[in-house]
């Protein structure tokens, strides 16, 4: 009776952290623990999960912390956005966890190479924000255009290759990270207020503008510009007709031939270098790249614009090949991922956590106030690696979570006319 009490008082996390074959063996041998999942009867320390994704969230610190907390070994591989889709479709046995964007799901889910998650096994599903469930930040929020995450988040069963139009018990992947993107500017080199996407093609910035050269994302920024100019009215910027694509690319091609763009970028470092050097003063940009430029002592603003933001989101999905102990370990890893430590790490870089409520527990009140509530920093704001990002008194560009994510106009997308769009985009880049 004494032994039974001692063993059953161990939490699941305690057992995982210890990874103790001795404890488990004693428990099973004494029959004090019965009815536990298979994972408890084996040594999880021997489990290695192979994860790939973009450099945004494939961070070594996450692998180290997962090893410390769970005993699981994570082998992370960083790829670019297009390569993540190719990996799922063409090399399905090369990964266990796919860290991909929601619009990528439209490309890869029909392959059947990923398996949906049983929501009843997700501990923190109720903490996930509404945009990854019914598409609404609040009950009264509008649903943005494009591949809104909720439209590809659910499927009808464990073997379904299509998306459900409503919530089910099967999640295509668990959301982890997202943000609201806009234009980055160098206010010291522009010298006047900027408040519209139209400024990207303003001849005033001839030879000093840039746009990211990832077709499925760049086209969305281009659409924000053309709609703001009043040149194109879209039915859905995330699913343009051929005519809308042609009009958009014609406008940008004309601007390119006139010398509007200094360069095009595909990587984080390229965008930072263009802005830090002053060769570019206005461009598509990602939040951490802005803070990187600021950390160099240069003024750089993630400019809120009157037409709203373009948004993106990513999450973790399971390989169809996962089963048994490895599948149990993957669920444990994903539950750990949403429990707060990783969310705090990501939010201190300027992203948002899919479960902000748990992330708050791993941030100081000052960090939470700055990153999530849009309040003035009470102390210097540091990144997770000890680098100063913002001085005391600074406020986040665009304000609070609700102010930024509540003004999302469209999500990164895969269009029905995707092949035509990519061809026209490549023609624009080559023009």
Image (tube, rainbow, N blue to C red):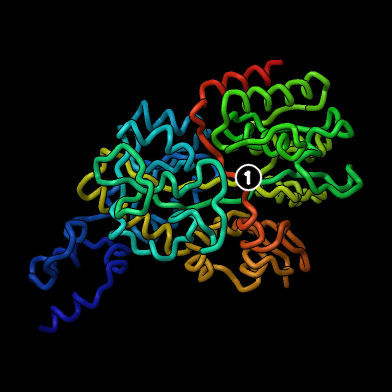
Residue designated by label 1: 310
Q: Compare residues 14 and 390 and report the one nearer the observer.
A: 390
Q: Nearer the viewer, residue 124 or 73?
A: 124
**Residue appearing at x 11%, y 68% in the figure:** 34
The structure residue drawn at horizontal position 44% and vertical position 32%, both measured from the top left corner, is 85
Q: Is residue 210 above or below residue 23?
A: above
Q: Whole-percent x and y of residue 145?
A: 56, 44
Q: Position of residue 164 (x, y in %)?
A: 35, 45
Along the horizontal axis of the image, is 241 left or right of 156? right
Q: Quadrant of residue 1?
A: bottom left
Q: Residues within 10 Å of mark 1 (few under 14, many from 20)?
A: many
Where is residue 89? Give x, y as percent: 37, 29
Image-quadrant location for residue 388 = bottom right
**Up-down relation of residue 225 to residue 242 (above or below):** below
Q: Residue furthest right?
A: 191
Q: Nearer the viewer, residue 81 or 73?
A: 81
């Amino acid at each position: 009776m004494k032994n039974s009490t001692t063993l059953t008082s161990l939490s699941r996390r305690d057992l995982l952290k210890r990874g103790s074959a001795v404890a488990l063996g004693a428990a099973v041998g004494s029959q004090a623990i019965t009815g536990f999942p298979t994972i408890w009867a084996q040594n999880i320390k021997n489990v290695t999960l192979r994860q790939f994704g973009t450099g945004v969230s494939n961070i070594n610190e996450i692998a180290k912390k997962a090893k410390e907390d769970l005993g699981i070994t994570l082998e992370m591989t960083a790829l670019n956005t297009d390569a993540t889709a190719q990996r799922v479709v063409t090399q399905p046995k090369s990964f266990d966890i796919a860290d991909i964007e929601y619009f990528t799901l439209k490309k890869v889910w029909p392959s059947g190479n990923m398996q949906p998650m049983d929501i009843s096994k997700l501990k923190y599903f109720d903490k996930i924000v509404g945009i990854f469930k019914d598409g609404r930040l609040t009950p009264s929020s509008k649903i943005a255009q494009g591949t809104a995450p909720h439209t590809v988040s659910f499927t009808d069963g464990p073997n379904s290759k299509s998306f459900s139009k409503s919530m089910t018990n099967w999640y295509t992947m668990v959301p982890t990270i997202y943000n609201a993107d806009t234009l980055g500017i160098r206010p010291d080199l522009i010298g006047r207020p900027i408040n519209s996407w139209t400024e990207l093609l303003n001849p005033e910035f001839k030879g000093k503008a840039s746009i990211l050269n990832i077709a499925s994302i760049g086209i969305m920024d281009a659409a924000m510009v053309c709609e703001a100019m009043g040149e194109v009215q879209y039915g859905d910027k995330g699913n343009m007709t051929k005519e809308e694509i042609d009009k958009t690319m014609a406008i940008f091609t004309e601007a390119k031939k006139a010398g509007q763009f200094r360069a095009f970028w595909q990587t984080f470092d390229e965008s930072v270098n263009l802005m830090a050097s002053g060769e570019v003063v206005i461009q598509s940009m990602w939040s951490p790249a802005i803070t990187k430029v600021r950390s160099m002592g240069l003024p750089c603003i993630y400019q809120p614009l009157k037409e709203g933001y373009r948004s993106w989101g990513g999450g973790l999905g399971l390989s169809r090949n996962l089963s048994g102990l490895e599948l149990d370990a993957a669920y444990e890893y994903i539950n750990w991922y949403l429990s707060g430590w990783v969310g705090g790490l990501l939010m201190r870089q300027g992203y948002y956590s899919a479960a902000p409520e748990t992330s708050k527990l791993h941030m100081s009140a000052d960090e939470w106030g700055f990153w999530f509530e849009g309040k003035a920093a009470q102390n210097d704001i540091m990144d997770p690696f000890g680098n100063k990002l913002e001085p005391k008194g600074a406020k986040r560009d665009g304000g609070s979570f609700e102010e930024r994510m509540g003004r999302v106009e469209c999500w990164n997308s895969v269009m029905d006319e995707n092949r035509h769009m990519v061809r026209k985009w490549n023609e624009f880049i080559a023009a």
